[in-house]
Amino acid sequence: MQEEQRTEAEERLFDILVFLATSARGCIDEPPLYGPFRLVDALSRLIDVYGHVPGLKKDPFLTEIKAEIDGKKFLVMSDPEGFKRFLDELVRKFTVELKRRSGQRS
Amino acid sequence: MEVLEAIRGRRSIRKYKPQPIPDEVVEKILEAGRWAPSGGNIQPWIFIVVRDRATLEMIRKVSPGYLGTAPLAIVVCSDKQRAFQVGGRLGRDYMTIADCAMAVQNMLLAAYALGLGTCVVKSFSPIAVREILEIPDGIEPELIVVVGYPDERPVVPHRFSIEEITYLDKYGNKFVRKGP
Protein backbone atom coordinates (compact mmCIF):
# COMPACT_ATOMS: atom_id res chain seq x y z
CA MET A 1 0.00 0.00 0.00
CA GLN A 2 1.32 3.42 -0.92
CA GLU A 3 2.10 5.53 2.12
CA GLU A 4 0.19 8.78 2.34
CA GLN A 5 2.32 11.89 2.27
CA ARG A 6 1.49 14.51 4.87
CA THR A 7 3.08 17.82 5.67
CA GLU A 8 4.38 18.54 9.15
CA ALA A 9 1.59 21.08 9.58
CA GLU A 10 -1.05 18.49 8.71
CA GLU A 11 0.43 16.05 11.20
CA ARG A 12 0.57 18.66 13.97
CA LEU A 13 -3.01 19.72 13.35
CA PHE A 14 -4.18 16.11 13.29
CA ASP A 15 -2.49 15.48 16.65
CA ILE A 16 -4.38 18.44 18.11
CA LEU A 17 -7.65 17.10 16.72
CA VAL A 18 -6.96 13.73 18.38
CA PHE A 19 -6.19 15.56 21.62
CA LEU A 20 -9.46 17.50 21.40
CA ALA A 21 -11.53 14.40 20.60
CA THR A 22 -10.09 12.35 23.47
CA SER A 23 -10.33 15.35 25.80
CA ALA A 24 -13.99 15.86 24.90
CA ARG A 25 -14.80 12.30 25.94
CA GLY A 26 -12.54 12.43 28.97
CA CYS A 27 -14.12 15.63 30.28
CA ILE A 28 -17.43 13.81 30.85
CA ASP A 29 -15.89 11.81 33.69
CA GLU A 30 -12.97 13.97 34.80
CA PRO A 31 -12.87 16.65 37.51
CA PRO A 32 -14.61 19.87 36.32
CA LEU A 33 -11.39 21.91 36.38
CA TYR A 34 -9.81 19.54 33.86
CA GLY A 35 -12.10 21.07 31.19
CA PRO A 36 -10.41 24.50 31.36
CA PHE A 37 -7.07 22.73 31.76
CA ARG A 38 -7.56 20.81 28.51
CA LEU A 39 -8.69 23.97 26.71
CA VAL A 40 -5.70 25.97 27.82
CA ASP A 41 -3.42 23.04 26.97
CA ALA A 42 -5.03 22.93 23.50
CA LEU A 43 -4.35 26.66 23.23
CA SER A 44 -0.66 26.02 23.88
CA ARG A 45 -0.60 23.20 21.33
CA LEU A 46 -2.33 25.37 18.72
CA ILE A 47 0.19 28.17 19.22
CA ASP A 48 2.86 25.58 18.49
CA VAL A 49 1.46 25.21 14.99
CA TYR A 50 2.45 28.80 14.16
CA GLY A 51 5.68 28.71 12.27
CA HIS A 52 4.91 25.27 10.84
CA VAL A 53 2.01 26.23 8.59
CA PRO A 54 2.77 28.18 5.41
CA GLY A 55 1.38 31.69 5.85
CA LEU A 56 1.32 31.42 9.65
CA LYS A 57 4.51 32.96 10.91
CA LYS A 58 5.64 32.86 14.54
CA ASP A 59 3.86 35.48 16.60
CA PRO A 60 5.82 37.05 19.50
CA PHE A 61 2.69 37.70 21.54
CA LEU A 62 1.51 34.10 21.18
CA THR A 63 4.99 32.73 21.82
CA GLU A 64 4.99 34.61 25.12
CA ILE A 65 1.49 33.36 25.92
CA LYS A 66 2.54 29.77 25.23
CA ALA A 67 5.50 30.07 27.59
CA GLU A 68 3.19 31.43 30.27
CA ILE A 69 0.66 28.64 29.75
CA ASP A 70 3.29 25.91 29.88
CA GLY A 71 4.75 27.41 33.02
CA LYS A 72 1.47 27.81 34.88
CA LYS A 73 -1.01 25.22 33.59
CA PHE A 74 -0.10 22.71 36.28
CA LEU A 75 -1.42 25.08 38.94
CA VAL A 76 -4.67 23.24 38.28
CA MET A 77 -3.24 20.31 40.29
CA SER A 78 -1.85 22.23 43.25
CA ASP A 79 -3.53 25.62 43.44
CA PRO A 80 -6.99 25.86 41.82
CA GLU A 81 -7.40 29.50 42.90
CA GLY A 82 -4.02 30.34 41.40
CA PHE A 83 -5.09 28.52 38.22
CA LYS A 84 -8.23 30.68 38.01
CA ARG A 85 -6.16 33.85 38.52
CA PHE A 86 -3.79 32.67 35.78
CA LEU A 87 -6.75 32.18 33.40
CA ASP A 88 -8.13 35.63 34.31
CA GLU A 89 -4.77 37.17 33.55
CA LEU A 90 -4.57 35.22 30.29
CA VAL A 91 -7.95 36.57 29.19
CA ARG A 92 -6.89 40.10 30.18
CA LYS A 93 -3.70 39.82 28.11
CA PHE A 94 -5.63 38.50 25.10
CA THR A 95 -8.10 41.37 25.43
CA VAL A 96 -5.37 44.00 25.59
CA GLU A 97 -3.80 42.42 22.50
CA LEU A 98 -7.19 42.25 20.77
CA LYS A 99 -7.67 45.98 21.37
CA ARG A 100 -4.16 46.70 20.14
CA ARG A 101 -4.76 44.72 16.97
CA SER A 102 -8.10 46.45 16.52
CA GLY A 103 -6.30 49.78 16.59
CA GLN A 104 -7.42 50.78 20.06
CA ARG A 105 -5.19 51.48 23.03
CA SER A 106 -6.10 50.29 26.52
CA MET B 1 17.11 3.61 49.59
CA GLU B 2 14.81 3.51 52.61
CA VAL B 3 11.16 2.85 51.80
CA LEU B 4 10.01 5.93 53.74
CA GLU B 5 12.52 8.07 51.89
CA ALA B 6 11.15 6.84 48.56
CA ILE B 7 7.56 7.42 49.67
CA ARG B 8 8.28 11.01 50.69
CA GLY B 9 10.62 11.85 47.82
CA ARG B 10 8.65 10.52 44.86
CA ARG B 11 6.96 13.15 42.65
CA SER B 12 4.92 13.05 39.47
CA ILE B 13 7.37 13.89 36.69
CA ARG B 14 6.20 15.47 33.44
CA LYS B 15 9.53 16.32 31.85
CA TYR B 16 11.97 13.55 30.97
CA LYS B 17 15.39 13.07 29.44
CA PRO B 18 15.40 11.00 26.23
CA GLN B 19 17.90 8.54 27.78
CA PRO B 20 16.70 4.94 27.31
CA ILE B 21 16.01 2.68 30.27
CA PRO B 22 18.05 -0.55 30.46
CA ASP B 23 16.08 -3.82 30.30
CA GLU B 24 17.22 -4.97 33.74
CA VAL B 25 15.91 -1.75 35.28
CA VAL B 26 12.52 -2.23 33.61
CA GLU B 27 12.42 -5.80 34.88
CA LYS B 28 13.07 -4.64 38.45
CA ILE B 29 10.11 -2.26 38.19
CA LEU B 30 7.87 -5.05 36.88
CA GLU B 31 9.12 -7.33 39.65
CA ALA B 32 8.06 -4.73 42.23
CA GLY B 33 4.64 -4.55 40.60
CA ARG B 34 3.97 -8.26 40.69
CA TRP B 35 4.70 -8.45 44.43
CA ALA B 36 1.93 -6.05 45.34
CA PRO B 37 -0.83 -7.21 47.66
CA SER B 38 -3.82 -8.75 45.90
CA GLY B 39 -7.31 -9.44 47.24
CA GLY B 40 -7.87 -13.21 47.19
CA ASN B 41 -4.46 -13.41 45.50
CA ILE B 42 -6.24 -12.95 42.17
CA GLN B 43 -3.32 -10.92 40.79
CA PRO B 44 -5.53 -9.45 38.07
CA TRP B 45 -2.81 -7.24 36.66
CA ILE B 46 -1.34 -7.48 33.19
CA PHE B 47 1.50 -5.13 32.29
CA ILE B 48 2.08 -3.98 28.73
CA VAL B 49 5.53 -2.42 28.41
CA VAL B 50 5.53 0.10 25.58
CA ARG B 51 8.92 1.21 24.35
CA ASP B 52 8.37 1.27 20.58
CA ARG B 53 8.56 4.97 19.77
CA ALA B 54 5.72 5.04 17.26
CA THR B 55 3.40 3.14 19.61
CA LEU B 56 4.42 5.34 22.52
CA GLU B 57 3.63 8.44 20.47
CA MET B 58 0.18 7.10 19.56
CA ILE B 59 -0.56 6.33 23.21
CA ARG B 60 0.55 9.82 24.19
CA LYS B 61 -1.63 11.42 21.55
CA VAL B 62 -4.81 9.71 22.75
CA SER B 63 -4.03 10.47 26.39
CA PRO B 64 -4.72 14.12 27.28
CA GLY B 65 -3.23 13.56 30.72
CA TYR B 66 0.01 12.18 29.33
CA LEU B 67 2.21 15.27 29.31
CA GLY B 68 5.78 15.34 28.18
CA THR B 69 7.64 12.63 26.40
CA ALA B 70 9.30 9.66 28.03
CA PRO B 71 11.12 6.64 26.57
CA LEU B 72 8.79 4.12 28.18
CA ALA B 73 5.26 3.56 29.44
CA ILE B 74 3.71 0.63 31.26
CA VAL B 75 0.03 0.17 30.58
CA VAL B 76 -1.41 -1.58 33.60
CA CYS B 77 -4.47 -3.63 32.69
CA SER B 78 -6.76 -5.84 34.72
CA ASP B 79 -8.13 -9.20 33.71
CA LYS B 80 -11.80 -8.63 34.51
CA GLN B 81 -12.90 -12.11 33.45
CA ARG B 82 -10.44 -13.92 35.69
CA ALA B 83 -11.21 -11.54 38.55
CA PHE B 84 -14.92 -12.32 38.20
CA GLN B 85 -14.36 -16.07 38.06
CA VAL B 86 -12.30 -16.00 41.25
CA GLY B 87 -13.64 -13.00 43.14
CA GLY B 88 -17.17 -12.45 41.85
CA ARG B 89 -18.50 -8.91 41.39
CA LEU B 90 -16.39 -7.57 44.26
CA GLY B 91 -13.30 -9.00 42.61
CA ARG B 92 -14.18 -7.70 39.16
CA ASP B 93 -15.53 -4.25 40.02
CA TYR B 94 -13.43 -3.18 43.00
CA MET B 95 -10.47 -5.41 43.74
CA THR B 96 -9.06 -5.16 40.22
CA ILE B 97 -8.81 -1.40 40.63
CA ALA B 98 -7.35 -1.62 44.15
CA ASP B 99 -4.90 -4.34 43.18
CA CYS B 100 -3.69 -2.51 40.07
CA ALA B 101 -3.31 0.69 42.10
CA MET B 102 -1.18 -1.14 44.67
CA ALA B 103 0.94 -2.69 41.91
CA VAL B 104 1.41 0.75 40.39
CA GLN B 105 2.49 2.26 43.71
CA ASN B 106 5.06 -0.50 44.10
CA MET B 107 6.37 0.28 40.61
CA LEU B 108 6.51 4.02 41.29
CA LEU B 109 8.57 3.51 44.44
CA ALA B 110 10.88 0.99 42.77
CA ALA B 111 11.39 3.34 39.81
CA TYR B 112 12.17 6.23 42.15
CA ALA B 113 14.68 4.12 44.07
CA LEU B 114 16.32 3.26 40.72
CA GLY B 115 16.72 6.95 39.86
CA LEU B 116 13.73 7.17 37.53
CA GLY B 117 10.78 9.52 37.39
CA THR B 118 7.21 8.43 36.81
CA CYS B 119 3.76 9.83 36.28
CA VAL B 120 0.51 7.92 36.59
CA VAL B 121 -2.01 8.74 33.90
CA LYS B 122 -5.71 7.98 34.13
CA SER B 123 -6.77 10.65 31.62
CA PHE B 124 -6.51 8.50 28.53
CA SER B 125 -9.02 7.12 26.10
CA PRO B 126 -9.51 3.43 26.96
CA ILE B 127 -11.15 2.85 23.58
CA ALA B 128 -8.14 4.27 21.76
CA VAL B 129 -5.55 2.54 23.95
CA ARG B 130 -7.39 -0.76 23.49
CA GLU B 131 -7.33 -0.27 19.72
CA ILE B 132 -3.65 0.73 19.55
CA LEU B 133 -2.40 -2.12 21.77
CA GLU B 134 -4.91 -4.68 20.45
CA ILE B 135 -6.18 -5.43 23.94
CA PRO B 136 -8.88 -8.14 23.85
CA ASP B 137 -12.32 -7.97 25.48
CA GLY B 138 -12.29 -8.76 29.19
CA ILE B 139 -8.98 -7.01 29.70
CA GLU B 140 -9.31 -3.41 30.89
CA PRO B 141 -6.58 -0.77 30.66
CA GLU B 142 -6.64 0.82 34.13
CA LEU B 143 -3.63 3.11 34.39
CA ILE B 144 -0.62 4.19 32.38
CA VAL B 145 2.69 4.59 34.18
CA VAL B 146 5.00 6.91 32.26
CA VAL B 147 8.66 6.17 33.05
CA GLY B 148 11.88 8.01 32.28
CA TYR B 149 14.87 9.79 33.73
CA PRO B 150 13.57 13.02 35.25
CA ASP B 151 14.45 16.38 33.75
CA GLU B 152 12.71 18.49 36.37
CA ARG B 153 12.35 18.79 40.13
CA PRO B 154 8.71 19.56 40.88
CA VAL B 155 7.79 21.56 43.95
CA VAL B 156 6.62 19.60 46.97
CA PRO B 157 2.82 19.57 46.82
CA HIS B 158 0.50 20.28 49.73
CA ARG B 159 -0.42 17.36 51.95
CA PHE B 160 -3.05 17.33 54.68
CA SER B 161 -1.52 16.87 58.11
CA ILE B 162 -1.99 13.61 60.01
CA GLU B 163 -4.33 15.41 62.44
CA GLU B 164 -6.52 16.58 59.56
CA ILE B 165 -7.08 13.09 58.16
CA THR B 166 -6.89 10.82 61.21
CA TYR B 167 -9.18 9.96 64.11
CA LEU B 168 -8.45 7.76 67.09
CA ASP B 169 -10.73 4.83 68.00
CA LYS B 170 -13.86 6.42 66.52
CA TYR B 171 -14.79 8.90 63.84
CA GLY B 172 -14.45 12.49 65.05
CA ASN B 173 -12.19 11.67 68.01
CA LYS B 174 -9.05 13.74 67.54
CA PHE B 175 -5.79 11.94 66.89
CA VAL B 176 -2.95 13.79 68.58
CA ARG B 177 0.57 13.29 67.30
CA LYS B 178 3.20 12.54 69.89
CA GLY B 179 6.16 12.54 67.51
CA PRO B 180 8.04 15.52 66.04
Image (spheres, coloured by chain):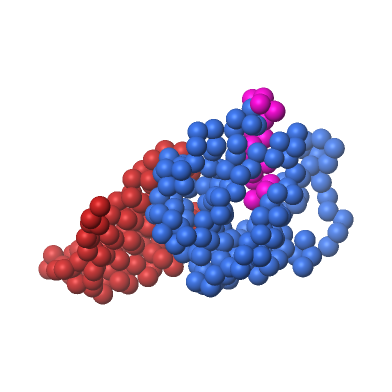
Chain colours: A red, B blue
In the displayed structure, B45 sits above or below B24; it is above
Report the label total.
0
In the displayed structure, A58 sits above or below A45; it is below
Question: Which residue: 39% across, 64% down?
Answer: A69
Which sits in the foreground, A41 or B102?
B102
Horizontal side, residue B46 vs residue A98: left or right: right
Where's residue B123, x and y in %? Answer: 48, 47
Magenta residues, start to end: B85-105
Residue B96, magenta (yes or no): yes
Q: Residue furthest bottom?
A: A60
Question: Which residue: 46% across, 38% down?
Answer: A29
Question: Which residue: 43% across, 56% down?
Answer: B55
Which sits in the foreground, A82 or B64?
B64
Horizontal side, residue B139 vs residue A10: left or right: right
Q: Main secondary structure of the magenta part?
A: helix
Question: Which residue: 71% across, 55% down?
Answer: B32
Which sits in the foreground, A11 or A4?
A4
Task: Let me know if residue B115 appears in the view.
Answer: yes
Task: Let me know if residue A37 appears in the view.
Answer: no
Q: Quarter-wise, where is residue A48 in the image?
A: bottom left
Where's residue A10, x and y in %? Answer: 23, 59
Where's residue B60, x and y in %? Answer: 43, 55
Quarter of the image for the C terminus of chain B: give it. Answer: bottom right
Where's residue A54, x and y in %? Answer: 16, 68
Quarter of the image for the N terminus of chain B: give it. Answer: bottom right
Q: Residue furthest right?
A: B178
Q: Residue furthest left?
A: A103
In the displayed structure, B23 sits above or below B132; it is below
